[in-house]
Amino acid sequence: MRRIAEHMPILAIGISHRRAPVELIERLAFAEEELPKAYRRALDDEAIGEAVILSTCNRVEVYGSVTAYHAGFLALKRLLCEPHGVDPIEVSEPLYSHFEDDACRHLFAVAAGLDSMVTGEPQILSQVRQAHRRASDEGATGPGVTALFHAAARAGRRVRAETGLGAAPDAFVRAGLGLADEDIGGLEGKRAVVIGAGQMAALAVKQLRHRGVGSVRVLNRSPERARVIAQRSDAEHGDLSELSEAIRHADVVISATGATGLLIHASTVREAMAGRTNPMFILDMAVPRDVEPSVSGIEGVRLVDIDGLRASVAQGDARLAEEVAGAESIVDEEVRRFAVRKRSERLAPLIRALRERGESVLASELGRFRSDLSELTPDEREAVEAMARGIVSKLLHDPIVRLKDLSGPGNDTTYAKVLAELFGIEHRPE
């Protein structure tokens, strides 16, 4: 296996829901069976030392230890585009890159759920962990990205343990049902259809019941999973073959699946609205979307998607804003912790060499005065040697502390080089 140099800089590039259309994310997504070849491609590139591919419904990112920013950027961009036959020009506008501490901060925020479509959604932390495990299985990881991903997982765990951000999806469901309540004149006694069997669908069923909806029917590709959710709230259940008929009788439709294509088409909704006078509210909480956008143009139908919900939550849930601020504070703290650890690791060889130089000078001077010390008692000789060691230690202490304090982003090697030159130590920063 190719040797991975220590302390190669970390670079992350990718696209996400924030700037890229769903269609482009889907084209760049890596299927499970595509990963072995992708990692072989990465390890064959001289600009890449390590690599981790994070591919989810709303982001495709590649994290790598690279020889330098420019060469690494081009290499990771090739890795992102070429396997899918996507022209790099197509990703130029939505593509982002983060280098070193910025890459660390970005991944920590991702793992904490701060960069998700639904703020605080819990699946992303496990997806980050799984991405690293998969890369490790393919032999694509080393000390750099492994330390980064372990630290990101720690940040994500802390956010979930120390804040209420994990409850943020509940805020999105509440906001959506609040809009539905306003739009169709109250939810009590109304008929609802929930499509999906994940966390968001389960929250929707629970809150619909809490708001007094007359009937709830849960539909999913797997009827058994639909049954599990339905039983918790005394709802009905079925499979997707019943979708058109269920929508025909529904006042509220909530879709929150992990499907890659559209489930609810405009033609289906148009047929359901034919001949009826009561309005229909459709809440699309899926990423990528489950509902064809043109549904919003059908008379009597209101369609709200994740973007609309985000605006509603931002206006009406001050508690969520507080939790986000708390999560961001934890991320900042963990980024600083990781940066200090990285600097300490990079400076360790020089600090070790400084101390060895001090020990060498001490031994030389004690040897030079050996005859003068011979007349001392053993206890006196030990006291003199201890005093000499203390002087050397104190003289080196302040330069070492200042070196750690002053070595930061952009000048990691500057002070180290100066100190090494002053003490006559050969130092080659990794």
Image (cartoon, rainbow, N blue to C red):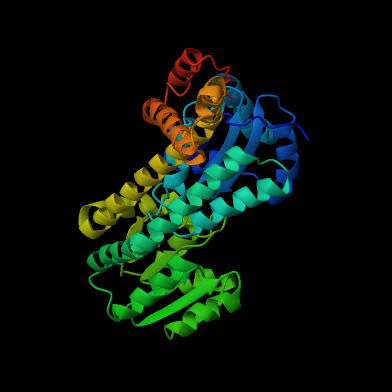
Task: Name the one closer to the observer, 143 or 316.
Answer: 143
- Image quadrant assignment for residue 201: bottom left
Comparing 195 with 154, the one in front is: 154
Quarter containing the C terminus? top right
Decide if residue 365 is in sight here.
yes
Give the residue at the far right of this rendering: 1
The picture places residue 244, in percent across and down from the top left corner, at 51, 69
Name the foreground residue: 329 vs 121.
329
Q: Residue at x 50, y 55 (%)?
A: 125
Tell me if residue 26 can be seen.
Answer: no
Position of 263 compared to 186: left or right? right
Where is 391 relative to 422, above or below?
below
Q: Residue at x 35, y 43 (%)?
A: 332
Count of numbered badges drawn on the protein: 0
Residue 195 picture location, percent across and down: 49, 68
Q: Nearer the viewer, residue 414 or 57?
A: 414
Q: Quadrant of residue 75?
A: top right
Instruction: State whether residue 259 is above or below residue 227.
Output: above
User: Horizontal placement of 166 versus 244: left or right?
Assistant: left
Residue 254 drawn at (x, y percent): 41, 66
Q: Position of residue 96 (x, y in %)?
A: 47, 31
Image quarter (top left, top right, bottom left or bottom right) of the N terminus: top right
